[in-house]
Amino acid sequence: MSKRMLAGIALFCVLVAAAFAQSAYVNLETRLTPEQLRETGLDTLSAEQLAALNRLLRADAERMAKSAPAQGRETGGSAWQLGLDEKPIRSRLKGTLSGWEPGTEFELENGQRWKVLKGSLKLRKPLQSPEIEISAGVAGRWFLHFDENWPGARVYRVD
């Protein structure tokens, strides 16, 4: 497969995910396959019961969507979100920063703990409690940076 085709497929997937993340609630009978409806027992519900369940789930989804911006959403969102609308997390690192590699765990002054998934760096001189920024990338990826002139690390939250 060519690089151009792969880039097109990736762009398509991102656009579809964005559309689903921003769209209204999708009824269960549309969202699930007939096999999934049978596995969950939802196929045994009457039309009225299914409509009531969809109504309750839709109201809950709308309530959550309305309350999310008020909460700041600085500590991550739901799994269905792309993450591009997440605000950066700014804090100080507890302790000394001398570098990182996959598996390195960091604790921040705000109480969060993050672990390096990808990337490595070795500093010539360790930094004591540096200010860091953890910013969201595409599809729920997070990146730790302590200086814009240095490469960041791909991280995930462990607490």
Image (cartoon, grey):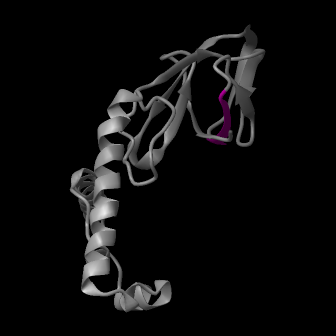
Residue 152 in percent (x, y) is at: 55, 29
Residue at image point 30% right, 78% down: 50
Taking depth in this image into account, of 93 and 43 the one nearest to the observer is 43
Residue at image point 25% right, 74% down: 51
The picture quadrant where one finds residue 27 is bottom left
Asked if the magenta segment contains residue 45, the reply would be no
Q: Is residue 147 visible?
A: yes
Q: Is residue 10 left or right of residue 79?
A: left
Taking depth in this image into account, of 142 and 99 the one nearest to the observer is 142
The picture quadrant where one finds residue 45 is bottom left
- Tally of numbered discs: 0
Our reading of the magenta stretch's main secondary structure is strand
Residue at image point 27% right, 64% down: 55
Magenta-highlighted residues: 112-117
Residue at image point 26% right, 58% down: 20
Residue 105 in percent (x, y) is at: 74, 34
Q: Is residue 3 visible?
A: no
Q: Is residue 145 left or right of residue 58?
A: right
Viewport quadrant of the N terminus:
bottom left
Taking depth in this image into account, of 71 and 136 the one nearest to the observer is 71
Taking depth in this image into account, of 102 and 64 the one nearest to the observer is 64
Residue 98 in percent (x, y) is at: 75, 19
Residue 111 in percent (x, y) is at: 68, 24
Tell me: residue 76, above or below residue 90: below
Viewport quadrant of the C terminus:
top right
